Amino acid sequence: MSLSVVILAAGKGTRMRSSLPKVLHAIADKPMVSHVIDSARQLGAVNIYVVYGFGGEVLKATLTSENFGDDLTFIEQKEQLGTGHAVDQASPYLKEDEDVLVLYGDVPLTKVSTLESLLKVKPENGMSLLTVHLANPTGYGRIVRTDGEVVGIIEQKDAAPEQLLINEANTGILYAYGGDLKRWLSGLSNDNAQGEYYLTDIIASAHSEGKTIATAHPETEIEVEGANNRVQLAALERAYQARLAEQLMIDGASLRDPARIDIRGSLTIGSEVSIDVNCIFEGSVILGSNVKIGANCILKNCNISDNAEIKPNSIIEEANIGENCSAGPFARIRPGSVMNKDSHVGNFVEMKKTTLGEGSKAGHLTYLGDALIGQNVNVGAGTITCNYDGVNKFKTVIDDNAFIGSNSSLVAPVSIGASATIGAGSVIAKNVEQEDLAVARGKQRNIKNWARPTKN
Ligand code: UD1
Ligand code: CA
């Protein structure tokens, strides 16, 4: 039977104190609701219905293109009349003969394995409910059982004193047959303490029809926690990061401090990877085997090959770093850059759209932009490729084995031939042929016994 998922996302999120709808607040740079959409897809949902209330336009505009797909439908809940009313907005879309899972756009950390267990426990003639035993269940709906069987859910505000002692709480996540769900929803009333249409009332309807209500439970409480304010959002972020860090270590990475790493995307690793403190990984980052990442690095959408080392305080974005390379400390490798194997860039070196050939080095204080650099080139300290004339960008080509003296300016477009040498301090605006020496600087004059000026 096919699976549809209804995601409730209509809450305004007043306590976020934000103009952004609550479910768009991010965990690891991704809106909470996108995490939930991802989980629904991993479960194989054919249709995903997002019930929204506020900021529908912002919602659609903020979700990234990868969130969209034929499987996704946005449904407006014009007035927030309760969780039952919210799910009922999706009723016209739900088929009689399909399975329906209800999730929450502000509960992003539920594990797919937990949801799978919920799907698995549902009896043929019944429904299943995700519940959690809490030391302090205040605020939650309580699971009412008779002789061990679930017979209903009572909300905190409607509960009798003895019901408040129940510590099995409703997470809100449930799973039922489409036809049943639609029928139960159509029978809801708002005759309760909050004057709302409670989704939780369908449990009593199911029970009165003689259906069995099975329960499943998350591994940890954090899986079913929502974020109503930024304090809770930050707590979810830390929990999520801890989960990713733990997985990385299980996969063989050594983390100097698992509490000081942030992964905002996907990080793929080879064996014997080590990562020092305060590193941030964004987008899709791939680290080969024996890669070392020093403290305080930021890596975004890049590929670091085997045995490469990124030294502290370096920033690498949309670049490829080859085998045995080293970069940093304080290197900045910008989009479109490639370091071929055994190449090296040192402190305060910036690269942009530049290829550094095998075995080449730029050790200190250098800008390499729009440059194609061959093998075994030595780029001296303070070298600048002058790639921009204020209007257009131009390329610099440096051939194999060239030696660029320190503090040279290479005014593009310009090419330096193989094994050519540039004298230190040169401003090179004309091509240099292979094996030539180019020196382009003012001649030194030494003035004998020169008297320094005196103060007036
Ligand atoms: C709900 C459950 C409660 C459960 C708790 C878990 C009901 C009646 N109660 O209570 O048993 O223990 O969640 O957190 O279901 N929403 C809409 N439209 C609405 C109302 C709510 O989309 O009209 C969304 C909210 O944005 C939120 C979710 O549904 O994401 C839950 O709503 P909320 O008002 O927080 O329910 P609780 O009172 O906490
Ligand atoms: Ca709530």
Image: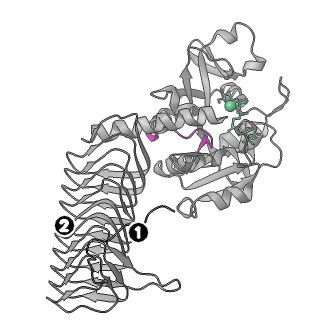
- Which amino acid is tagged 1? Pro
Does residue 204 lie above or below 378 as drawn? above
Count how many numbered circles sit on residues in the image: 2
- Pointer 1 local density, CA inside 10 Å: few below 14, some 14–19, many at least 20: some
What is the secondary structure assignment of the residue under circle 2? loop
The numbered mark, 2 or 1, whose residue comes first in the sequence reads 1
In this view of the protein, which residue sits in the foreground, 315 or 91? 315
What is the secondary structure assignment of the residue under circle 1? loop
Q: Quadrant of ligand 2?
A: top right
Q: Position of residue 283 (x, y in %)?
A: 44, 57
Q: Position of residue 156 (x, y in %)?
A: 72, 19
- Pointer 2 local density, CA inside 10 Å: few below 14, some 14–19, many at least 20: many
In this view of the protein, which residue sits in the foreground, 10 or 115? 10
- Name the residue carrying label 1: 335
Does residue 426 lie above or below 260 as drawn? below
Magenta span: 100-112
Res. 398 image quadrant:
bottom left
Marker disc for residue 102: none
Q: Residue at x 73, y 40 (%)?
A: 17
- Name the residue carrying label 2: 341
Mark pair 2, 1: CA separation: 18 Å
Q: Position of residue 227 (x, y in %)?
A: 62, 35
- Which amino acid is tagged 2? Lys
Does residue 146 lie above or below 68 as drawn? above
Q: Are marks 2 and 1 in contact (CB under 8 Å)?
A: no
Q: Does the rendering let one see residue 252?
A: yes
Q: Is residue 363 left or right of residue 260?
A: left
